[in-house]
Image (cartoon, rainbow, N blue to C red):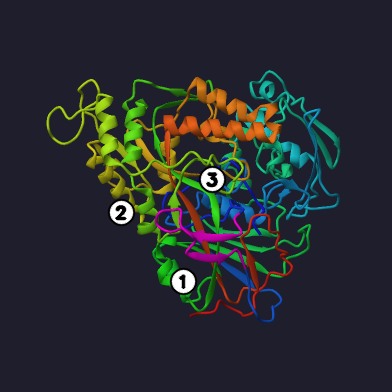
Amino acid sequence: MRKSLEKNLIQFMTTMTISSLVLSTAPMVHAEETDGEGAPSIDIPTSVEHEGEVMEGGTLKIAYVSDTAFAGVFNNMFYTGQPDAVVIEKFNPGLYGFDNNFKIDDSGFAKVEMDIENKQVTITIPEGVKWDDGEPITIDDVIFPYYVVGHPDYTGIRYGSDFENVVGMAEYHSGEAEEISGLERVDDYTLKVTYLSFPNSMVQAGGGISSYIEPEHVFEGIEVADMEDSAPVREKPVGFGPFKVDSMTPGEAVTYTANENYYKGRPNLDGMTINVINPNSIIAEMKAGNFDIASLPTDKYDTFKDATNFTNIGYEMNVYTYIGFKMGKWNEEEEKNEFNPDLVTSNKALRQAMAYAMDNNSVGSEFYQGLRRAADSMITPNFVEYLNPDVKAYEYNPEKAKEILAEAGFKDVDGDGLVEDPNGEKFTLNFASMSGGETAAPLAQYYVQAWNAVGIPVQLLDGQLLEFNSFYERIKKDDPEIHVFQAAFGTGGDPNPNSAFGERAQFNYSRYVSEENSKLLADIESDESFDDAYRQKAFYAWQEFMHEEVPVIPTLWRYELTAVNKRVSNWDVEIGADLDWSKVGVTAESPIAE
């Protein structure tokens, strides 16, 4: 069922209980022992089939578990937060499909043929398919997003190395050309794209080939600069997925009806609803039979693991939580990150000390009942061939943290228990963290206390947690009041870290830039990386470097649990699964209560 994918745009809440985007290949969820290395203590399947005769029609009730409302940007070219992505994937799931290894295959809407030697792909879409408003889909709807994202007046955050890799895109983006020379419209249903380089990532979903397809006709007459706030994005989006948006309550709920024009055949269900539900109440809501589908908080697993009216399924996500350090700013004019070596957070010793001060194995076992574990790297464990086995998470060693600080000149000059910087000047780091469930506040407080305990002066920004949208708004704008922050990143189908750590990556929120980092990232993306051994070696080298420099501290790898009410005939969260919506249904008029 998890077929939509956005590689490098999914910024997750730090301690929330959501995420319905495709992010995993794990066949089973394994909750590790508290040391993160023991035998699995919990086995949870990735799919379920419930008994009962399936009704014709019915409405599926989905709970989006969050204390954050939808921002209401329902378009793949413009959204920035996971809440909106959940809405989008139901009506506009993307261009191509992929298998359980995230390799692009023929299971999606378009067929993608790769010509490695000539650095080209040919994208072919089926004939005779319509948008949910009845208008025909043509290859112009595949070409259209390139001209929006690449436009000089584009207001979103999608433009980056992937798009700039298209021949002629840089010239179009700078205003030097009116057309993108690397796009060849072969006919009404075929597009040939030529790239400057064709690294091995291109075969991965989200690895460089745009998956965007948007209805050009609904944006007719709307300037690119005005699209983000236009009706087709904010009020009445159009797609080609199994369902179409019928109505919405801003920030709170979306109602869908079955798309009669769906190219795989009309869904059996008449429709579905998605409602934002607070993490503190979702378990009671599911037990009461108010919803069919919900991602439940792993920190509350013991309270719902034996529920009688729903089944728990799950998977290990391609997501890592991390502690980031603000070390510069985004240069809007030059579209690149600028590292500031004079900031106290730019001192590597301080960052290493903060890493040694945290006990993330205990965080995983105590805060999340073993359903999260200490992260060794920013490469998630799903990518076995790229995860460097010799790079391990910073062990909890507060004495080591103090030793590193002292050697770097961070000393407690005035005897207050907190260190001054190497120049003998006082400093205080403001720590930004997000709200989201009962765990958010105590977890943030734990980190602050752990850093204070080794003498590092850290305090919670503004004395409180930040709401999701406010948090990322301030992070993106490099709010000078934020020095350290806790966030999470979804790697999607391609482990290539350039989109999160490259010099020109807007998602490089730490703004860390170095010549060596750029070199190592370029090596991962080089033509030589088509050789599996070379590519693995390049990934290994980058991880070793990042572990030493620690511009971010990867803290936790996570699992997601999904509750499926027993009236739902079947559901599947395994990566690459392609559930037939004509066979997904319900066996009762309303969800079953406990």
At label 1, counting other C-alpha atoms closer than 10 Å, the crowd grade (few under 14, some 14-19, many 20 or more) is: few
Residue at x-position 48% and y-position 39%: 391
Structural distance between the alpha carbons of marks 2 and 1:
23 Å
The answer to which of 539 and 59 lies nearer the viewer is: 539
Mark 1 vs mark 3: give the one in front: 3
Direction from residue 217 to residue 306 in the image, left or right: left
Q: Dots 3 and 2: beta carbons under 8 Å?
A: no
> Label 2 sits on what residue type?
Pro
Please give the count of numbered marks on the rendered protein.
3
- Gap in angstroms between the C-alphas marked 1 and 3: 26 Å
**Mark 1 = which residue?**
305
Q: CA distance from mark 3 to mark 2?
A: 25 Å
Q: Secondary structure at mark 3?
A: loop
Stretch in magenta:
26-47
Relative depth, front residue between 496 and 566? 496
The residue that label 2 is drawn on is 442
Horizontal arrangement in the rendering, residue 202 relative to residue 459 (left or right): right
Look at discs 3 and 2 and give the one toward the viewer: 3
Task: Give left or right: position of 275 versus 326.
Answer: right
Q: Earlier in the sequence, mark 3 or mark 2?
A: 3
Picture coordinates of residue 92 (x, y %)? Answer: 67, 51
Question: Which residue is under mark 3?
Answer: 380
- Tell me if I can see residue 150 in this picture: no
**Callout 3 environment at 10 Å: few (<14), some (14 to 19), or many (20+)?**
many
Q: Earlier in the sequence, mark 1 or mark 3?
A: 1
